[in-house]
Amino acid sequence: MSNRQLTLSKRSPLAAVVAGMIAFGAAVIVAFSLSTADSVAAKSSKRVVLGKANSELTPNCGTNFSRDCLAEGKVTGYQVYRKGSQRKRGFVVPREGKVVSWSISLAKPTKKDIRKGANSYSAQLPFFNDLFGTPASARIAVLKRVKKKEKGPPQYKMVRQSPTQILNPYFGRTVNFTLNKPLNVIKDQIVALTIPTWAPAVWKPYSCSISPAGGVNDPVACDRAEEDYTWRASRANGKCTLGTDPDTGEPNTALKKTRPQQKVDSVKRYGCYYGSNVLLYTATVISK
């Protein structure tokens, strides 16, 4: 038995799964500060933490097998919310300023197969390493929407980005990275998460996890989560469900084609819209 999931479709059979999202039920979340910039920022009345509303959520992997293990990979994405949601604008910059730091909450993926009673759970870390590459890594990107009048999914120009951080040393914790060179932002730009390889930094509710009896644990609650917790990804429309062949293990076209947006001034269409999942990152903005 395995609770690893590789697809972003909440009702897909486990064998077809292959995209990414991990999370964890860690008992303690430890925040690391890599400099004193955040302590200064905390004293400012102009400080806003994008994504703060998600700070109570924990990722899905590790030894808590009650929720599907998910990890996202090779993508740039940002959280958005339905109209009327109390979480409102998510990662939209409210006013001109600088991104001074960002954080990411990480699961601690298992390194070996684990057996609990009659159930056996496959190792998570080598699985995602094989799918997306090593080591686990992430950075943040500042996006500006362009070509608004064109039909189809929104398009974004990547105007600047942070250095890439290796995540493996921080598995099982929430880590805060202070930027030596803060990123300038203006109102209505978006701070997105870029994952060059993979990151165990996704929350998915128990209601949407696969039930031993088939289907999901709570279809009604899962449908609600599908509407309330949504995010956009830098993948082509129609290539949103990453997967592998259940017999050969070969990646499908979507998995082969997925790419993060990492070239400054590049324009990319964000054609995939996922529900019942949250990318667990934040960005701290200090207004001018």
Image (tube, rainbow, N blue to C red):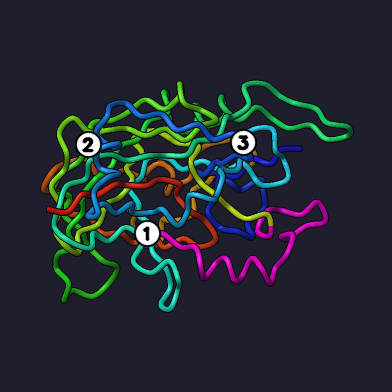
- Image height check: is 22 above or below 84? above
The first of marks 3 and 2 along the sequence is 3
Magenta segment includes 163: no
Residue in view at x 17 percent, y 61 percent: 95
Image marks 3 and 2: residues in contact by CB distance under 8 Å: no
Along the line of sight, which residue is nearer the eye, 99 or 229? 99
Say what amino acid the circle numbered 3 marks.
Ala
Q: Nearer the viewer, residue 273 or 168?
A: 168
Please tell me whether residue 221 belongs to the stretch shown in magenta. Answer: yes
State the extent of the magenta-drawn residues as a range. 207-233
Callout 1 environment at 10 Å: few (<14), some (14 to 19), or many (20+)? many
Residue assigned mark 2: 162
- Whether pointer 3 and pointer 1 mark residues with C-beta atoms closer than 8 Å, the reply is no
Instruction: Report the residue marked by disc 3.
Output: 26
Residue 38 % position (x, y): 29, 37
Q: Earlier in the sequence, mark 2 or mark 1?
A: 2
Q: Which amino acid lies under the numbered mark 1 shown in the image of this protein?
A: Arg
Residue mark closest to the camera, 2 vs 1 = 2
For marks 3 and 2, give the CA distance: 27 Å
Res. 102 image quadrant: top left
Residue 244 seen in the current view: no
Query: Who's the residue at 45% across and 57% down the image?
Result: 53
Helix or strand or loop: what does disc 3 sit on? Answer: loop
